[in-house]
């Protein structure tokens, strides 16, 4: 799709300013829901800058963590952090460089909607966990749950009607519980369940909200990077007019993700449904 030219993933540090702080908050609640014991081998697919890998290392005392991402820059950022028991590799989520059944748990955070064939990626996640092992993921609820992105794209469409086609709510309609449940079932996973994961997104002031949109990392910042200065200023002013600014100057919104989990069938069960 033409709008994918705005999906830039070349700077781990810039992404951290834009989305990393909220990614970590969601990852913490996701892991609490997953509730796995210590001593397991984890695979983190689409690991990005390593937020989920770092947290599961901190919270779950794993035997091993391997993070995998297609962005060399993000993998370099993740690998630079002193995360005990974790290693990171560059790889394709739809063709993982991992043998069958070598992990106890496979997870993916905020990645599936960016993949051209999500069901193929989920089947890969299932392939690399042991039979009976959990496969879980979470994605932002772009349609209804991302307050600051909704405000951004509403302002963008008001100043540039062509921007409406780039809105993640329009691009990624499969980020709700029904679609995720169906995706896991179509990949052959059993005991599938979903849950919402909501976190506050509190910005110290409007600049704290706006400046990360100028980092160039991800769909919305990638779009901002294409604008001429005057158009960028119009978008900034339109966004400022649409967000609630408190008496202390802060902007308080919320972000919601949807999480899904299932288990790889035992050896006497098929991994995926026929057809």
Image (spheres, helix red, strand yellow):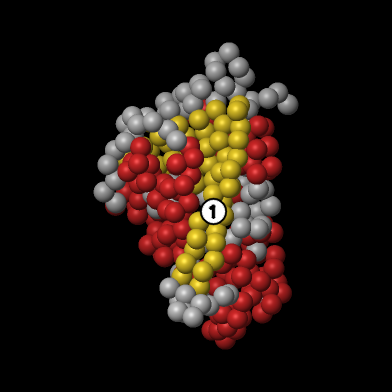
The residue that appears at 45% across and 32% down in the rendered structure is 105
Camera-side residue of 251 and 268: 251
The N terminus: image quadrant: bottom right
Identify the image quadrant of residue 7: bottom right
Count of labels in the image: 1
Q: Residue at x 50, y 56 (%)?
A: 199
Q: Position of residue 270 (x, y in %)?
A: 62, 19
Residue 83 horizontal/vertical position (percent): 29, 45
- State which quadrant residue 205 falls in: bottom left
Q: What's the residue at 31%, 36% (across, down)?
A: 61
Please say if 225 is above or below 96.
Answer: below
Name the residue furthest front. 247
Kindly identify the residue that appears in the image at 66 percent across and 57 percent down: 143
Residue 207 visible within the image: no
Image side of residue 198 versus residue 62, left or right: right
The residue that disc 1 covers is 198
Q: Residue furthest top?
A: 268
The location of residue 14, given as percent across then percent down, is: 41, 65
The secondary element bearing badge 1 is classed as: strand
Badge 1, how many Cα within 10 Å: few under 14, some, many 20+?
A: some
Which residue occupies the foreground of this view, 160 or 255? 255
Above or below for 159 versus 98: below
């Amino acid at each position: 799709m033409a709008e994918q030219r705005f999906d830039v993933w070349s700077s781990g540090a810039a992404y951290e300013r834009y989305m990393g702080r909220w990614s970590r908050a969601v990852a913490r609640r996701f892991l609490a829901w997953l509730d796995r014991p210590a001593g397991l081998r984890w695979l983190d697919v689409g690991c990005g800058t390593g937020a989920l890998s770092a947290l599961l290392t901190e919270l779950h005392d794993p035997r091993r963590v391997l993070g995998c991402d297609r962005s060399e820059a993000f993998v370099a950022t993740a690998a630079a952090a002193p995360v005990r028991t974790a290693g990171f590799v560059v790889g394709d989520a739809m063709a993982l460089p991992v043998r069958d059944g070598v992990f106890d748990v496979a997870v993916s955070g905020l990645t599936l909607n960016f993949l051209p064939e999500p069901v193929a990626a989920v089947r890969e996640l299932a392939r690399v966990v042991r039979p009976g092992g959990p496969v879980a993921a979470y994605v932002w609820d772009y349609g209804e749950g991302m307050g600051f992105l909704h405000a951004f794209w509403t302002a963008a469409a008001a100043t540039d009607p062509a921007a409406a086609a780039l809105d993640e709510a329009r691009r990624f309609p499969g980020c709700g519980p029904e679609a995720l449940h169906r995706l896991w079932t179509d990949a052959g996973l059993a005991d599938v369940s979903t849950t919402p994961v909501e976190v506050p997104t509190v910005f110290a002031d409007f600049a704290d909200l706006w400046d990360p949109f100028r980092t160039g990392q991800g769909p919305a910042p990638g779009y901002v990077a294409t604008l001429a200065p005057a158009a960028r200023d119009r978008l900034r002013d339109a966004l400022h007019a649409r967000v609630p600014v408190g008496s202390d100057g802060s902007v308080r919104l919320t972000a919601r993700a949807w999480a899904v989990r299932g288990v790889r069938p035992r050896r006497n069960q098929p991994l995926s449904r026929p057809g």
